[in-house]
Image (cartoon, rainbow, N blue to C red):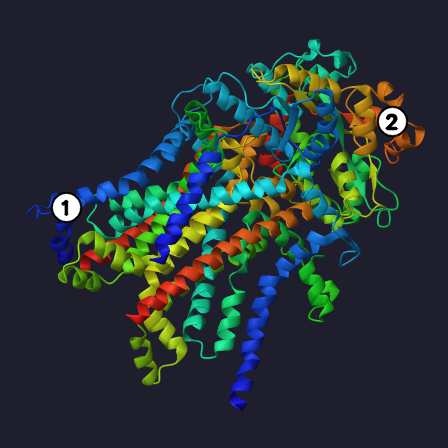
């Protein structure tokens, strides 16, 4: 008992430091979201209130509509990314592919090559195809960006699945497709889902591509956040960031729910 | 099996999104895209849009912002350019608000409509900046939304005798190391403007920077003018961006710095700057520029767009919206606006900087090619 | 590898085993993803890359690269150092967090840590940058907290808004990302090896370094490479924390475009950025492939 109590001293210090590191900056965000007056020489806000919340939620600013669009876009992006990366990840992890490394490197490109210059060309192509100003167009742009996460992480997840289990299933007479859906995919599910979370967050963080392909017909909340943040409008930026926390954390919790059930099921077998 | 349930629901949502993809256009929508701060979007949404919608029933104004600074205007240009190159029949924005620097290029590339002759308010703005944008002829293509100016913001509690000239400022910075801050050239126009003003203040023939003609042989003179800036920079705080200078003023880390007057007032109104802070213009002057209303060539709602700009550049709206509500310097000529306002409101605009000061020390930015030369000289001699 | 080539052809149906089908299947499975990147990124990217190799008159030249290195050579190095340092710190912290989640004996502490470490993941980069700007500044919230708490004297307060601020923000934002991946991989490890080592009296640090980390290394490295690439391409963090000299090349790219309309040099810097990312990823891939072939 005593030793355990003593162990809480270093533990408490480390966790306390971590809490300071994580929540220190976030407390700044919370303060700004409700600060109506905050300037030197005052270390803390002079006045708090909801005036800026009112401004964000004014009917003309369409904040709720943009939030809804952002979430729809993020979910669709996840769907598109998973649909193409699960097969791709499996192939890259398991099948003997020609040019495997170059292919993997190619998926890095959208993330590695800073986007602005490329989006101009994307916009041009999308205008020709009639994709500009549509949700589908924005989803495509986000998905291309998110693919690096889903493809790389699913590839790693499939590579980590123990082959002997698959072989056992095959030996018991399961078809390859059935083996994949009932053995391989569930075992790789945590990795696949982690990829989904990152794709979702990446989409909710994106504004450059959304501007070039979506605006003015499709507007998302991150666009408002970007404008407010770059202009130093801390209150509006903080409030939009807090609003965006809701779908982000919510998606993570939903995913965890599924994951837990799945992991437990596996332990049961 | 649960993951597949999830996938299914995600796919269903995606389908719903696809169906919702085609934007509902039951009403006529007038798309206004603006560079600059969020308060410009607010101005269009909250002030102009309701007025225009009563004027033109059945029309909805939709405003979108592209972000502050030249980057915001650049994005408008890039979107219009992409549409032109894609051969699109119409443009998806009807009215755009851009900075001076982009206007010349967009006129030259044929991206804009020469609409000014067709609007009734076309004659209300007669300043040089409605014809000349950094040396490019923009006559007939632009009308000013408001005029903005770079000025030194300072905390009067810490700066009892604000500098009157660049020489004063240099001495002040020596006496108060790190108490002056500006944002270099990569973080926005308030820093860039300070640098071009520095160059103009330290050149024998500064007028040629504004008036032309362009002469590449001036490059050494420009480098020489900037040579003192490197030593100056060792005693100043370099801030991250236009908003970064205001941000450091907010926390009292610097006591003085060049800022955009309109941003300064917004920050004060939003409670992010001490209301005691003051503004000053120094000799020989600091640059300013208007924001322009432009109509893209081939805008789908060109007729409505003209009526919108007409409303926005009328004396009534400029007085009530630009000056009274948002505390910006009017875009159209002062006398038209002055007539619509009481003395108190008008004078509030000139609390710190008098109209005479503004006339004498409010300068245009240098011609575009000189502008480039100054920036590159800064990168070569000051930053390295 | 040999097991693979025996089992896989069966996916193709009843046909007798031939060497071609698995590769063909692989290509077919990768194709949709590849086509997406090719159509919606590579093809438009092509225009950009071409412009990096052309001069003002449209002739082929490497002038943009010469200029990029002359003006921003220092920034290229600076970028590389910032990102490498951040990745190194992220690696240590992520392994520490994942390790404690896996090996921690006190369930309360583990639960607190699990709840705590993930929050930065949900804060977008641009907001993180803005928060850090007013948190790490000289008169910022951190120093105010430290002064109030009696940890430092007001005169000791310094601004961290230089390269340190950029590193702090990157580490703050990316540690949970890597930790999440690594903790997941650690959780799915076979625990018998860990328990055996524990029974033999091995310390927890020992177990982490010798048993756990080697097994999750592929996941860790993938997480780090993705972080490396992400940090390389983020504009908002250096832009808001320190866009003055020296700074990261994303700021220079934005500056070339916004101040000069100079897509040539901007794209040349983009190519340099991709080469840095590609080089790191390629080292990992070739290493990984060789190891795979060896086993």
Q: Label 2: state its secondary structure.
A: helix
Q: Residue C12 carries which label?
A: 1
Residue B62 seen in the figure: yes
Q: How crowded is mark 1: few (under 14 residues within 10 Å), some or many (20 or more)?
A: some
C171 to the left or right of B143: left
- The reply, left or right, for residue C133 in relation to residue B344 is left
- Callout 1 secondary element: helix
* Whether residue A13 is situated above or below residue B229 in the rendered picture: below
- Which residue sits at x=41%, y=60%? A258
Counting from the top left corner in percent of width and height, residue B97 is at 66, 25
Task: Select label 2 or label 1 by which is in front.
Answer: 1
Q: Quadrant of the N terminus of chain B?
A: bottom left
Specify the subunit that label 2 lies on.
B
Question: In terms of image quadrants, where is residue A118?
Answer: top left
In the displayed image of the protein, which residue is found farthest to the right?
B343
Mark 2 and mark 1, same subunit? no
Q: Is residue B25 above or below residue A51?
A: above
Task: Give whichever of C243, C207 is nearer the camera.
Answer: C207
User: In the picture provided, is C112 more to the left or to the right than A147?
Assistant: right
Between A239 and C79, which is closer to the camera in this rendering? A239
In the image as oriented, which residue stretches furthest toward the top?
B117
Residue A58, located in which quarter of the rendered image? top right
Q: Depth check: B281 or B235 in front?
A: B281
* Residue A18 in picture, x, y percent from top left: 56, 67
Furthest residue to the bottom?
A: A2
x, y percent for residue C224 = 41, 56
Q: Name the residue under label 2.
A: B355
**Relative to residue B246, is residue B325 depicted above or below?**
above
For the point 48% across and 79% down, the residue is C106
């Amino acid at each position: 008992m005593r030793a355990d109590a003593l162990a809480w001293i270093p533990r408490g210090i480390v966790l306390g430091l971590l809490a300071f590191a994580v929540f220190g900056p976030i407390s700044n965000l919370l303060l700004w979201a409700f600060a109506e007056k905050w300037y030197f020489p005052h270390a803390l806000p002079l006045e708090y209130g909801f005036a800026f919340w009112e401004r964000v939620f004014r009917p003309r600013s369409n904040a709720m509509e943009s939030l809804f669009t952002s979430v729809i876009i993020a979910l669709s992006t996840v769907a598109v990314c998973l649909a193409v990366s699960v097969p791709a990840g499996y192939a890259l992890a398991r099948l003997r592919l020609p040019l495997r490394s170059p292919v993997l490197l190619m998926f890095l490109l959208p993330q590695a090559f800073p986007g602005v210059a490329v989006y101009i060309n994307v916009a041009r192509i999308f205008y020709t195809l009639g994709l500009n100003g549509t949700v589908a167009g924005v989803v495509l742009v986000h998905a291309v960006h998110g693919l690096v996460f889903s493809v790389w992480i699913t590839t790693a997840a499939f590579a980590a699945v123990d082959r002997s289990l698959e072989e056992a299933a095959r030996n018991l007479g399961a078809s390859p497709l059935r083996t994949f859906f009932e053995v391989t995919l569930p075992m790789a599910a945590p990795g696949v889902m982690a990829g989904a979370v990152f794709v979702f967050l990446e989409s909710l963080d994106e504004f450059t591509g959304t501007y070039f392909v979506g605006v003015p017909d499709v507007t998302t909340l991150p666009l408002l956040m970007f404008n407010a943040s770059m202009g130093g409008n801390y209150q509006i930026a903080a409030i939009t960031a807090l609003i965006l926390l809701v779908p982000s954390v919510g998606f993570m919790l939903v995913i965890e729910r599924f994951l837990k059930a799945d992991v437990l099921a596996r332990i049961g077998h | 099996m649960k993951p597949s349930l999830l996938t299914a629901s995600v796919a269903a949502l995606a389908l719903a999104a696809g169906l919702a993809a085609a934007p509902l256009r039951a009403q006529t929508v007038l798309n206004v895209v603006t560079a600059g701060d969020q308060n410009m979007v607010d101005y269009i949404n909250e002030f102009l849009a309701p007025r225009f919608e009563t004027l033109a029933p059945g029309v909805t104004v939709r405003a979108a912002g592209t972000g502050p600074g030249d980057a915001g205007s650049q994005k408008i240009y890039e979107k219009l350019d992409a549409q032109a190159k894609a051969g699109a029949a119409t443009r998806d924005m009807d009215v755009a608000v851009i900075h001076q620097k982009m206007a010349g290029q967009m006129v030259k590339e044929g991206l804009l409509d020469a609409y000014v002759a067709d609007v009734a308010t076309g004659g209300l703005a007669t300043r040089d900046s409605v014809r000349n944008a950094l040396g490019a002829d923009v006559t007939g293509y632009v009308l000013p939304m408001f005029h903005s100016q770079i000025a030194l913001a300072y905390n009067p509690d810490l700066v009892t005798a604000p500098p009157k000239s660049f020489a004063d400022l240099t001495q002040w910075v020596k006496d108060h190391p790190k108490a002056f801050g500006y944002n270099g050239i990569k973080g926005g126009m308030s820093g860039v403007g300070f640098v071009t003003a520095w160059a103009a203040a330290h050149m024998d023939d500064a007028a040629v920077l504004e008036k032309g003609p362009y002469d590449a042989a001036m490059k050494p003179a420009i480098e020489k003018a900037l040579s003192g800036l490197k030593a100056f920079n060792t005693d100043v705080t370099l801030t991250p961006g236009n908003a970064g200078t205001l941000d450091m003023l907010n926390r009292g880390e610097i006591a003085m710095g060049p800022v955009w007057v309109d941003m300064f007032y917004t920050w004060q109104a939003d409670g992010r700057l001490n209301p005691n802070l003051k503004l000053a213009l120094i000799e020989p002057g600091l640059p300013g520029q208007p924001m322009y209303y432009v109509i893209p060539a081939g805008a789908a709602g060109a007729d409505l767009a003209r009526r919108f700009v007409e409303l926005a550049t009328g004396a009534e709206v400029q007085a009530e919206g630009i000056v009274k509500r948002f505390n910006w310097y009017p875009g159209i000529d002062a006398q038209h606006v002055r007539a619509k306002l009481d003395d108190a409101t008008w004078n509030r605009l000139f609390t710190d900087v008098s109209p005479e000061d503004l006339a004498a020390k409010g300068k245009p930015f240098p011609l575009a090619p000189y502008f480039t030369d100054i920036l590159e000289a800064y990168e070569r001699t000051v930053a390295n | 590898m040999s097991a693979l080539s025996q089992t896989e052809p069966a996916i193709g149906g009843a046909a007798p085993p031939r060497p071609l089908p698995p590769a063909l299947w692989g290509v077919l499975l990768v194709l949709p993803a590849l086509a997406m990147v090719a159509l919606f990124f590579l093809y438009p990217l092509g225009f950009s890359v071409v412009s990096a190799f052309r001069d003002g008159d449209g002739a082929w030249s490497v002038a943009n690269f010469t200029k990029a290195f002359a003006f921003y050579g220092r920034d290229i190095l600076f970028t590389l150092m910032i990102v490498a340092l951040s990745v190194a710190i992220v690696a240590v912290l992520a392994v520490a967090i994942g390790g404690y989640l896996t090996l921690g004996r006190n369930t309360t502490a583990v639960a607190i840590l699990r709840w705590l470490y993930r929050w930065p993941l949900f804060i977008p980069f641009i907001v993180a940058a803005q928060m850090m700007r007013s948190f790490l500044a000289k008169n910022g919230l951190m120093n105010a907290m430290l002064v109030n708490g009696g940890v430092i004297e007001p005169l000791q307060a310094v601004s961290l808004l230089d390269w340190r601020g950029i590193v702090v923000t990157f580490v703050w934002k990316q540690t949970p990302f890597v930790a999440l991946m690594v903790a997941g991989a650690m959780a799915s490890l076979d625990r018998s090896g860990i328990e055996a080592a524990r029974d033999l009296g091995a310390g927890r640090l020992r177990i982490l370094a010798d048993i756990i980390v080697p097994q999750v290394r592929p996941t860790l490295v993938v997480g780090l490479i993705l972080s490396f690439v992400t940090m390389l391409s983020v504009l908002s963090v250096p832009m808001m924390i320190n866009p003055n000299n020296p700074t990261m090349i994303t700021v220079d790219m934005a500056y070339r475009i916004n101040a000069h309309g100079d897509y040539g040099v901007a794209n040349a810097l983009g190519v340099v950025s991709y080469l840095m990312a590609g080089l790191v990823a390629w080292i990992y891939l070739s290493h990984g492939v060789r190891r795979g072939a060896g086993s």
